[in-house]
Image (cartoon, rainbow, N blue to C red):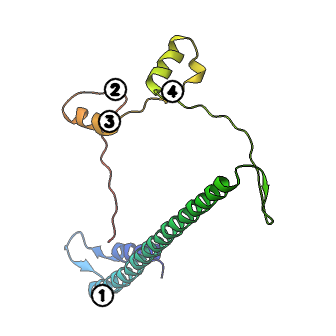
Amino acid sequence: MKLYEINEEIDRLTDTIYVDEETGEVVGDVAAICKEIETLQMEKKKVLEYLAKVVLNTRAESAALKAEEERLKARRERLDKKAERVLAVIDRECGEKTDLGVATLSYRPSTAVEVSDNKKAVYWLMINGHMNCCNMQEPKVAKTAVKELINSGVEVPFCKVVENRNCSLK
């Protein structure tokens, strides 16, 4: 039986209990109805227990995959560094375009900008009208600081502290 079906059946059984308005007496077989509701609640508990096990197993599997990803990432990074070190040795020994049998070592010219003092460079670019050369990040609200401000009694427009209910299963 599905969880929603169990809930519907419990509601249906609860609705079948009738109290006589004049005498205040409960009409119907209350003991049988209560026993059936109890059985349904036990079945509901089993379903919920199963779903909790599914959540815990899924979390455990996810954690195992995350650990494996981290292990593989560390291994890949070690291999990348090893390749860089070996290439540096080849570069040091050859120094110019060389045919190595299975591969050819070659060089290509490239250019890059090095900035020694970022603040001074940005200031110069801004005062000289080169705003397109500056990356300006959009300001964001520091939510922790705003929460403290609101909790201290200050009204901050467009901001409010909301209380959420977070479900947790351990």
Q: Residue 104: x, y in percent?
A: 79, 57
Residue 136's disc number:
4
Residue 83 found in image quarter: bottom right
**Please, what secondary structure does the residue beneath circle 1 have?**
helix
Residue 56 found in image quarter: bottom left
Q: Is residue 109 left or right of residue 1?
A: right
Kind of residue at badge 2: Pro
Q: Nearer the viewer, residue 121 or 16?
A: 121
Kind of residue at badge 3: Lys
**Where is mark 3, residue-wise?**
160
- Quadrant holding the C terminus: bottom left
Residue at 26% from the left image edge and 73% from the top image edge: 19
Residue at 34% from the left image edge and 32% from the top image edge: 159
- Dot 2 or dot 1: first in sequence order is 1
Q: Nearer the viewer, mark 3 or mark 4?
A: 4
Spatial CA distance of label 2 from label 1 is 56 Å
Spatial CA distance of label 3 from label 2 is 8 Å
Kind of residue at badge 4: Met
**Please, what secondary structure does the residue beneath circle 3 have?**
loop
Q: Nearer the viewer, mark 1 or mark 4?
A: 4
Residue 35's disc number:
1
